[in-house]
Image (cartoon, rainbow, N blue to C red):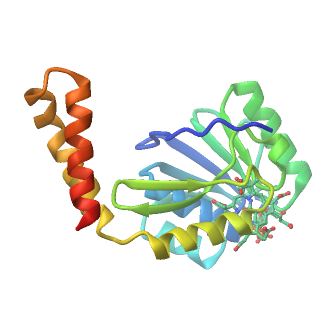
Amino acid sequence: MAYYPIMLDLSNKKCLIVGGGSVAERKANDLLKAEACVTIISPKVTEGIENLYRERRVDLKLREYQQGDLEGYFLVIAATDVPEVNEEIYAEACDRGILINTVDQKERSMFISPAVLRKGDLIIAISTSGKSPLLARKIKQFLDDVISDDIVNIVYKLGDIRDDAKARFDNIEDRIRYYEDVIKKYIRE
Ligand SMILES: C[C@@]1(CC(=O)O)c2cc3[nH]c(cc4nc(cc5[nH]c(cc(n2)[C@H]1CCC(=O)O)[C@@](C)(CC(=O)O)[C@@H]5CCC(=O)O)C(CC(=O)O)=C4CCC(=O)O)c(CCC(=O)O)c3CC(=O)O
Ligand SMILES: NC(=O)C1=CN([C@@H]2O[C@H](COP(=O)(O)OP(=O)(O)OC[C@H]3O[C@@H](n4cnc5c(N)ncnc54)[C@H](O)[C@@H]3O)[C@@H](O)[C@H]2O)C=CC1
């Protein structure tokens, strides 16, 4: 499988997770970090999901998945521990043209989740194309240790000077030279 990585804007988009175990909880927290509107359908849920519901951060339907549940959603994650149910959800998502991630079968997924390191606006996503999620997590931890938190300010400042540079320099070559000088200065510091 040759994947195409993208950065999706999920803010205020309706996203559904079917299943309420530890995998569903991890995916729910990641979707919330992206400011998505999250609904979970599952007869049983973890304490973590129960807390998210109590804090009104997710909507919850305490029942099994039914055909038709995907109506109106932008994205769905099939995270039950029953392969046949995940297959049904995948089939409905394909019929409706909804983006789907099936946690137990990458062949039944239109996208898979990378391990994600966030430092302010810098987002580093690591995928092994599904070969070893554990390795993806370890690489994330390694990068977290070696990339200083100063990067948060550097990215912020570079974002800030960009509008100014567009007004100051007419051509892109001059702008790129300017950004490179600023980046060199910050990295040296
Ligand atoms: C294909 C994919 C689909 C998807 O979920 O999107 C998938 C599938 C499966 N994962 C399984 C197992 C584990 N998954 C993790 C952890 C994570 N899994 C994540 C992503 C992905 N997992 C996608 C590919 C990512 C890539 O391309 O590398 C991460 C990165 C992000 C996230 O989940 O959001 C997150 C780390 C988050 C972080 O810490 O940052 C751990 C380790 C742990 O829990 O510590 C284990 C146990 C160790 C191991 O197996 O490696 C199993 C077998 C279950 C079984 O054996 O029963 C399947 C199914 C299969 O492979 O058949
Ligand atoms: N993608 C990933 O990162 C990983 C995937 N997995 C896979 O993910 C699956 C789920 O893992 P866990 O969360 O640990 O399992 P779990 O057993 O803790 O949770 C399964 C959840 O699915 C719910 N469920 C069962 N039937 C349902 C139905 N018909 N409708 C709605 N909800 C239903 C259960 O109530 C439960 O809340 C496992 O089968 C495993 O193969 C496991 C580890 C990591």
Residue at 79% x, 39% y is 90
Q: Nearer the viewer, residue 131 or 63?
A: 131
Residue at 72% x, 54% y is 128
Across and down, in percent, residue 81 comes to 83, 62
Across and down, in percent, residue 131 comes to 81, 56
Residue at 14% x, 34% y is 165
In the image, taking residue 30 as reference, residue 46 lies left or right, namely: right
Q: Is residue 21 placed above or below 41 in the rendered structure?
A: below
In the image, taking residue 164 as reference, residue 108 lies left or right, namely: right
Q: Nearer the viewer, residue 63 or 137?
A: 137
Q: Is residue 179 placed above or below 167 in the rendered structure?
A: below
Q: Is residue 165 placed above or below 121 in the rendered structure?
A: above
Of all residues, the one furthest to the top in this rendering is 170
Quadrant showing the C terminus = bottom left
In the image, taking residue 177 as reference, residue 131 lies left or right, namely: right
Query: Could you tell me if residue 88 is visible in this image?
Result: yes
Where residue 114 sits, quadrant-wise, is: bottom right
Quadrant showing the N terminus = top right
Across and down, in percent, residue 140 comes to 57, 67
